[in-house]
Image: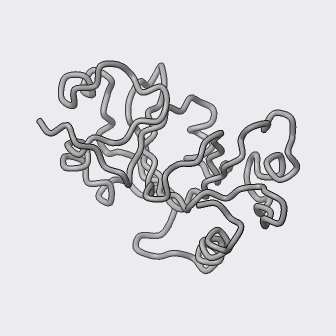
Amino acid sequence: MSRSHLTTDVILAMQDPYMSQIVDGTKNYEFRKYCLKPSVKRIWFYRTAPHSALTHICEILPARTRNPGDPRLEENGLGNAEFNNRHEDWDGYDFAYKIVSVYELRHPISLASMRSEYSFKAAPRGLVYLPQVVAERVAWRQQKLVIGEEGERTSSTMEELSASLEPGNQV
């Protein structure tokens, strides 16, 4: 089995209720204390117990920051206003990733399968780059689209992408 990893896809652990909020669209940004590499285009979410499985894939835009002069996030999702206003619960969460689409894996990959079929030693806890073999066996575009439009980007998404690439914004 190949030990190589993709630089475009990462695995992040996610617990409920946050995963449910992403799936139902109330949470439209993923907030992190660290900046993902600019090459990262998708987050594969490992849903913690009781699910203990890779269950969803989200396409994301480059990181938005809240440095002086950066445009504010639209306050249309859970946590966006808190991010903009530097709420104390958001201390250190300086990177916001717009969730463009959400796919549900048609066959979630259980922790047991992750160990036996994909050589994981334990459940993902921090940032893990997706092993190439997972991408080869699970075509992300063939999963169930929950949020987003197949093959399309909305004009607001393109505007956000443009804004995130303006000078002064970290990507």
In the rendered image, residue 108, in percent from the top left (x then y), is placed at 33, 36
Residue in the picture at 76% in, 46% down: 79
Q: Residue furthest front?
A: 168
Nearer to us in this view, 63 or 112: 63
Q: How many marks?
A: 0
Residue in the picture at 44% in, 53% down: 42
Q: Is residue 61 left or right of residue 168?
A: left
In the rendered image, residue 142, in percent from the top left (x then y), is placed at 29, 58
In the rendered image, residue 40, in percent from the top left (x then y), is placed at 44, 54
Q: How is the image coloured?
A: one colour
Residue in the picture at 31% in, 49% down: 6
Q: Quadrant of the C terminus?
A: bottom right
Nearer to us in this view, 25 or 33: 33
In the rendered image, residue 69, in percent from the top left (x then y), is placed at 83, 66
Q: Quadrant of the N terminus?
A: top left
When asked about the image quadrant of residue 165, the answer is: bottom right
Residue in the picture at 44% in, 33% down: 46
**Above or below — where is 20 with respect to 47?**
below
**Above or below — where is 63 with respect to 22?**
below
Nearer to us in this view, 56 or 33: 33
Q: Is residue 159 left or right of residue 105?
A: right
Q: Residue furthest bottom?
A: 155
Q: Is residue 145 left or right of residue 137?
A: right
When asked about the image quadrant of residue 114, the answer is: top left
**Above or below — where is 72 with respect to 116?**
below
